[in-house]
Image (cartoon, rainbow, N blue to C red):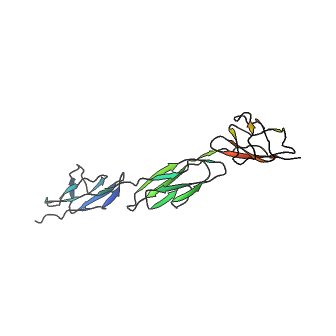
Amino acid sequence: LDNPVAVINNINAICEGSNTTFTAGGGVNYVWNSGDTGPVITVGDDLDRIVTVTDANGCTATASSSVTINPLPVAVITGGDEICAGETTVFTATGGVTYIWSSGETTTSISVSDDRERTVTVTDINLCSNTASKNLIVNDVKYAGDDIYVDCYKDVEVIMKAEGNGSWKAGNNNPALVVIEDVTNAGTRISGFNIPGTYTFIWSDGKCQDEIQVVAGND
């Protein structure tokens, strides 16, 4: 009597963390070296599987097969971590050949202006996929107050009307050096306008800032 022709049908490669099936043929009873019995087994590693096939006459044959395990791509999102409200930054994904963002885009880079989490699914040339996520911190806009106009620069003192926490500093191109009474006080007093002109002051918390101009006239 001829021995049966044992065969195993399976795909050649899977992605790390996935499973596939090996299907044996050629007989009526099947015993695998993994301890499984029956024609179909589930495989999630790259170990050789050997099946002993027995036909109706009690004759046996063996076949073996294995599957390649492709590693998952390393998905990475780079881009700004913080912006001020009203600004935009760019998130860029790497690690694959195709990209699908939770916000619907299919490009490598996307524009982001809110604090909703963005998740990207990255797929490589082996069709293996992985994800990465990133949040953007959106800081409140600073308010330095309305511009101030004074008719005469001599002996003038202005009171600032900023909001929130921060610190004051004078602009680099002011006509003269001035005195800021308390740089951390939103309502500080500023004096020393010794030359008429337009003075710029910046209210900042180190992340976001706003500017105000004090126009000192010469009347």
The answer to whether residue 175 is left or right of residue 66 is: right
The residue at the far right in this view is: 219
Q: Is residue 79 above or below residue 191?
A: below
Report the number of discs.
0
Query: Residue at coordinates 62% horizontally, 52% vertically from top-left?
Result: 113
Residue sitting nearer the eye, 115 or 152:
152
Measured as percent of width and height from the top left, residue 144 is found at 74, 43
Query: Residue at coordinates 25% horizontally, 54% vertically from top-left?
Result: 38
Residue sitting nearer the eye, 149 or 137:
149
Residue sitting nearer the eye, 136 or 6:
136
Q: Is residue 161 above or below residue 73?
A: above
The answer to whether residue 155 is left or right of residue 9 is: right
The residue at the far left in this view is: 1
Query: Residue at coordinates 77% horizontally, 43% vertically from top-left?
Result: 145
* Quarter of the image where one finds residue 204: top right
Measured as percent of width and height from the top left, residue 65 is found at 23, 59
Measured as percent of width and height from the top left, residue 214 is found at 79, 45
Query: Residue at coordinates 31% horizontally, 53% vertically from top-left?
Result: 42
